[in-house]
Each structure stands twice: as C-alpha cells, then as structure tokens.
Amino acid sequence: MLTHSDAVDAGAVGRGIGSSTDDGSCLTAESDWASHAVLGMRLDATSCQDGARSIIDWAAAGESRVVCAASVNNVMHARSDPRYLTVMNGADLVTPDGMPLVWALRGLGVRRAEHVRGTDLTTAVLQCAADEGVAVGFFGGSPDVLQELLASVGRRWPRLRIAYAYSPPFREASRAEDERTVESINASGAQILFVGLGCPKQELWMASHRDRVHEVMLGVGAAFDFLAGRKRQAPRLMQRTGTEWLFRLAAEPRRLWKRYLRQNPRFLALIALQLIAARIGRRPSET
C-alpha cells in the first residue's frame, strides 16, 4: 500500500476498504480509492458508501483514525497554513466535499472522483452504525443544537446506539479539562466520534487527539446544524452543479461573503494553473 505522502507526491492509488450498493446497504471491504494533491492538499476519491464502510471497519477494529470532509475552504486554509496542511495530509481519509474539488480531481486524472459531502457521509455512517450495532458519539455544536441533533438522529435511526454527546465551551479547554474530556469519550463505549467544531478547529482537534481518543474521529462541520434542522441544505441540483455555495451565501451572507470573495477566485486561478501544468506533462504545481 502506498503511503499518504506517496499519494500527495504522485497522485497515486492508495488502498481503501468498502463497497457501495444501489440500496445504500453496507458490504464487505473490496474497493481501491485514488488520491491526488489539489494545491498541495491530498484528496481521496472514495464514495459515501465506501467511505462509510471504511469508517465502520476501523471502528470495529478499535482504531483511532481521523476522517475529514474537505471543501475549497479547507484547501485554501491549508495553502496558507503549513501546520494545517500537515494535519490534512496526515488524515486517514479526506473526502472532496464540493463539486469544484471533484472537478479538479477528475481534471488531474482521478476519473472515479465523487462528491462526498460531510452531511451525506455522516448519514451513511449513521445508517451503517445503526444496522451493525456500532456505538457513536457527538462532540461539538452549541448545547441547543446538540440536543436537537440527538432528537433528530434518534427519531431517524431508533436502533442507533448513542453513547456520548458533549457540547464543549467555545474557549480553549485547559489541560485538565481536555484530559477529562478524553477520559469521558474513551469510557463511553463510543466507537465513532462525530466532531462538529468547524474548520480549522475540528481538524486540528482531531489531529492533536489521534491515539489519545481511541475512536474513529469524523470532522463533519455544518452537518450538526443540517441534521438538527437548524439550517436548510441546498437542493440536490445545486449540490451536483457546484452552486451550493450560492445557496449558503444567500442563507448566511454576513458570515460567508468575505470568505467566498477572498477564496473562490484565488482557488479558480490556482487550480487552473495546476491543471494546465498537468495537461502539458509537468508535475502539477503544489506551490
């Protein structure tokens, strides 16, 4: 199996586990996924069901893993922050949460790249966990959102084992508080921990707690709000056509307009240069 660094350097194929079905059920491990760097940050071309199968199998084995659902925001943040880039490239699975990233992967030769939104991956994992008796936990969100999330998830998957839920304070935790949180998570019996702290906080938190937290950690960002019913999701047509950002901008203009104005044009220009370099046969630029 090739390492993540090999995949980042060469856009090589890494070994994944899992297979998908038309009815969304979980099967045994049998798939490969390809990985490629987009502006220096590794993305893995898996599917929702393959990714969910990987997470369930890691959880069943009691492994501490880090899974990220990456948007253009993650890529651009990684480009400006070397520490964050190292965190993202060190994750066990990084899915393309946004059609621009899927199109970039396909343009770089990863033809099997699919759109794997954090919310869709969360839903697929919860379905598999409910089917197979895998206990889950939730870490993040405000207390009100977390309670609404638990109620919504409980109604949708009544057989799901929810072993842990905690809304941490927005300030940085002290060392003693962090140690108590880790002890509580590990003692809860949860095997998968959904982390909803937002970018970049959730990815940094998961990386710093790898091996300390014994569960598979899945950073899902806005999925807590979506599944709790606090925020509306974009229509599927907008998700498939890469215009989901317009829907979110209309819903939260004050929070998102500066990010989109600053990041989206730069991303388009930089990925165009990487695609041109790849097309003329040079190694795609990661600078």
Image (tube, helix red, strand yellow):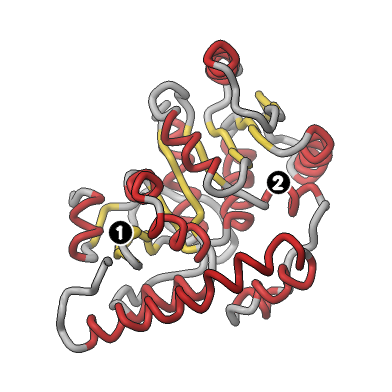
Q: Residue at x 70, y 28 (%)?
A: 169
* Nearer mark to the viewer, of 1 and 2: 2
Which residue type does callout 1 highlight? Asp
- Kind of residue at disc 2: Phe
Q: In which quarter of the image is residue 257?
A: bottom right
Using the image, determine if residue 69 lies above or below residue 266. above
Residue at screen point 33% across, 54% down: 30
Q: Where does label 1 land, which residue? A: 32
Q: Horizontally, is 108 left or right of 235 in the view?
A: left
Mark 1 surroundings within 10 Å by alpha-carbon count, few (fewer than 14), some (14 through 19), many (20 or more) = some
Is residue 137 visible in this depiction of the protein?
A: yes
User: Residue shown at 43%/78% (left/top)?
Assistant: 103
Q: Is residue 247 left or right of residue 183?
A: right
Disc 2, SS: helix
39 versus 100 height, above or below: above
In the picture of the structure, the residue carrying the numbered disc 2 is 224
Whole-percent x, y for residue 170 in the image: 68, 33
The spot of residue 11 in percent (x, y) is 24, 65
